[in-house]
Amino acid sequence: MDNVIKAINKKIKQIVISLTVVGILLLILSFLTVWTAFMAKLVMGMVILLMAYVFLSTAYRLWQIQQSFKDIGKGKK
């Protein structure tokens, strides 16, 4: 049972770190949009890429948690 809690704790920490980094990057990009029209287009592209990264990385980490639960259910460590 301790292994389950440790695995879940590790994955949650990874998700929190990922979301924090993306949040900081989005904050920086929001300041850059004020300058020029070209920068606004560039920043919008970066925002879309960052959102895609957030969704994909979060989905992968949740899938890893799901696999951990399946392994525990089968008796594997």
Image (cartoon, rainbow, N blue to C red):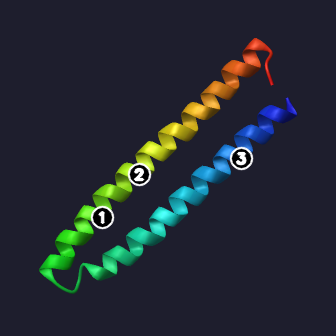
Left or right, 28 with respect to 20, comes to: left
- Choose the circle earlier in sequence order: 1 or 2: 1
| Amino acid type for the residue under numbered disc 2 | Tyr
**Distance (Cα) linking label 1 and label 2:** 10 Å
Q: Image point 63% across, 25% down: which residue?
A: 67
Q: Image point 67% across, 52% down: which residue?
A: 13
Name the foreground residue: 23 vs 52: 52
**Distance (Cα) linking label 3 and label 2:** 19 Å
Badges 1 and 3: C-beta atoms under 8 Å apart?
Answer: no
Q: Image point 49% across, 46% down: which residue?
A: 57
Left or right, 59 with respect to 74, comes to: left
**Distance (Cα) linking label 1 and label 3:** 28 Å
In the rendered structure, find residue 46 and report the number of the disc placed on it: 1
Left or right, 43 with respect to 50, comes to: left
Q: Which residue is mark 3?
A: 10
Residue 36: x and y in percent read 16, 84
Q: Which residue is mark 2?
A: 53
